[in-house]
Image (cartoon, helix red, strand yellow):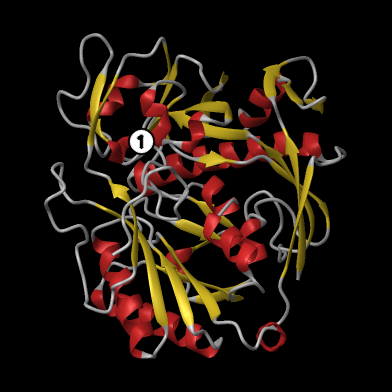
Amino acid sequence: MRLELGRITIKDVQFGEKTEVRDGKLSINKAELEGLLAEDPNIASVELDLAKPGDDVRIIPVKDVIEPRVKVEGPGGIFPGFISKVDTVGSGRTHALSGVAVVTTGKIVGFQEGIIDMTGPEAEYTPFSQTLNVVVKVTPVEDLSQHKHEYTVRMAGLKAAAYLGDAGRDIEPDKLEVYELGAVPETAAKYPGLPKVVYLYMLQSQGLLHDTYVYGVDAKKIIPSIMSPMEIMDGAIVSGNCVSACDKNTTYHHQNNPVISRLFARHGKDLCFLGVVISNENVTLADKERSSSYAAKLVQMLGADGAIITEEGFGNPDTDLIMNCRKLEEMGIKTVLITDEFAGRDGASQSLADAVPVANAVVSAGNANEVIELPPRGKIIGDLKTVEVIAGGFAGSLNPDGSIKVEIQALTGATNELGFGKLRGEGY
């Protein structure tokens, strides 16, 4: 399988008469896109706005972030199972509007949605202060259930990203990245002297608005599965959850997973990258045991010497993380964990809800309980009052002058467990 990912560098975005990319600028027909999204009968109104790096803007509550893309050549299409029919993606050619992100906001869905500030010291905590954001504010019809509300906002974001991505269909990319991985026996034989590594990718799937979708299927309905890393990079996984904003994997994170890109960068040099096993995160002990055993079996069957495991969320999923680690280590497969910490505001509490002695190679993405004060911003896109109910906020978070005090848990992507951010901790 071979994927060509053409990145079209976008330097500015603006509203205009025609949706097009020209000379590194994205122009958007606002009325056309708003009209397209408003066709959903579950949407009472939709409003587009722009937020650029350095703008005196705060976006709250953030639901999802998505990179606009278009499938140019090869099988499948964008966001299979949602926007396109369910064909296997991960090969051919896809164009991405690099530097642009669709950000969805509006009436709060769940309590674990986030904040993006486009300027100030707090902007350093989120990578999406550095993207040109096309913000889609959705107001659903009255009395819509939470799950239908979440689905409606999710689909609006995906539709907007597909609409914008199509503007890059006939544009020559500024950069062409090529990712290729053959069958496992062929790949392993090609690099006999290098350690063989598998990536175990944990997906949030605990229900109650804690969902992730694989080819349109809720991940809690699947058993662990082998996937090509190119499928993931080509939009096969979509976020649909309301876990804490700090370590939530938005759709943008799945599209641009840094663990996958770093493994490709080192493939054939100091390691042999065999592929990805996706695993769900479960609620009951029996389901956790089943899923972790099955995931470990698949990693072993692929012939891995080592594995990297990433978690999504915290607390209950820590048990899945540690089970995966323990079972792989018992098979003789060395593991490295990437996670964040909830160690209390003073950093003195136990970082994870579970632990085991063999989990001795851990990379921390930071302590999500750290408290930060955010000054008032000149423009709010969304609803600032939700800061007192989102995870990381609390009664009294919002001050009369519009400044807020929250844990960094409330900042979108602040302690992302793929390492997609600027915070770092010591490996231990």
Question: Residue 350 is drawn in which quadrant?
Answer: bottom left
Relative to 108, say whether 210 is above or below. Answer: below
34 versus 212 height, above or below: above
The x, y position of residue 318, in whole percent, is 27, 65
Look at 37% across and 25% down and name the residue there: 121
The percent coordinates of residue 227 (x first, y second) are 60, 72
Which residue is nearer to you in this view: 194 or 377? 194
Give residue 144's position: percent from left, percent from top.
41, 37
Q: In which quarter of the image is residue 99?
A: top right
Q: In this view, does 186 lie to the left or right of 266?
A: right
What amino acid type is highlighted by mark number 1? Leu
Which residue is at 44% across, 52% downward? 419
The residue drawn where x is 38% and y is 57% is: 312
Examine the rendered structure and indicate whether residue 22 appears above or below residue 376.
below
For disc 1, the marked residue is 411
Q: Residue at x 21, y 71 (%)?
A: 355
User: Along the horizontal axis of the image, is 78 left or right of 400?
Assistant: right
* Residue 141 shows in the view: no
